Amino acid sequence: MGKNIVLIGFMGTGKSSVGQRLAEKLKMKF
């Protein structure tokens, strides 16, 4: 089973930006 990371927060707080960089560092698909 795969692992998931969930980022929670208000719109416009950078969740997608952080998620993309985190995925790169962890060699995961975003």
Image: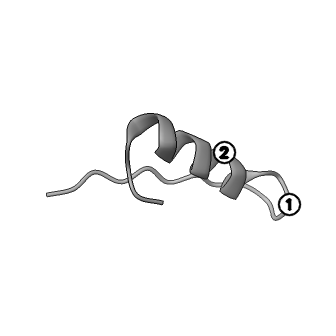
- State if disc 1 and disc 2 touch (CB < 8 Å): no
Picture coordinates of residue 1, whole percent (x, y): 13, 58
Picture coordinates of residue 26, whole percent (x, y): 40, 37
Work out whether residue 4 or residue 21 is closer to the camera in this orientation and state it: 21
Q: Is residue 19 left or right of residue 28?
A: right
Question: What is the spatial separation of the Cα atoms under label 2 and label 1, in whole angstroms?
Answer: 12 Å
Picture coordinates of residue 29, whole percent (x, y): 40, 58
Query: At 48% from the left edge and 60% from the top edge, which residue is drawn?
Result: 30
Q: Is residue 10 left or right of residue 3?
A: right
Furthest-top residue in this view = 25
Q: Amino acid at mark 1?
A: Gly
Q: Is residue 18 left or right of residue 13?
A: left
Query: At 28% from the left edge and 51% from the top edge, which residue is drawn?
Result: 3
Q: Amino acid at mark 2?
A: Val
Query: At 36% from the left edge and 54% from the top edge, which residue is drawn?
Result: 4
Furthest-bottom residue in this view = 11
The residue at which mark 1 appears reads as: 12
Q: Which mark is residue 28?
A: none
Determine the secondary structure under disc 2.
helix
Name above or below for residue 30 compared with residue 18: below
Q: Is residue 8 left or right of residue 29?
A: right
The residue at which mark 2 appears reads as: 18
Picture coordinates of residue 19, whole percent (x, y): 59, 50
User: Badge 1, how many Cα within 10 Å: few under 14, some, many 20+?
Assistant: few
Badge 2 or badge 1: first in the primary sequence? 1
Determine the secondary structure under disc 1.
loop
Give the total number of marks visible in the rendering.
2
Q: Nearer the viewer, mark 2 or mark 1?
A: 2
Residue 27, by quadrant, is top left
Name above or below for residue 22 compared with residue 29: above
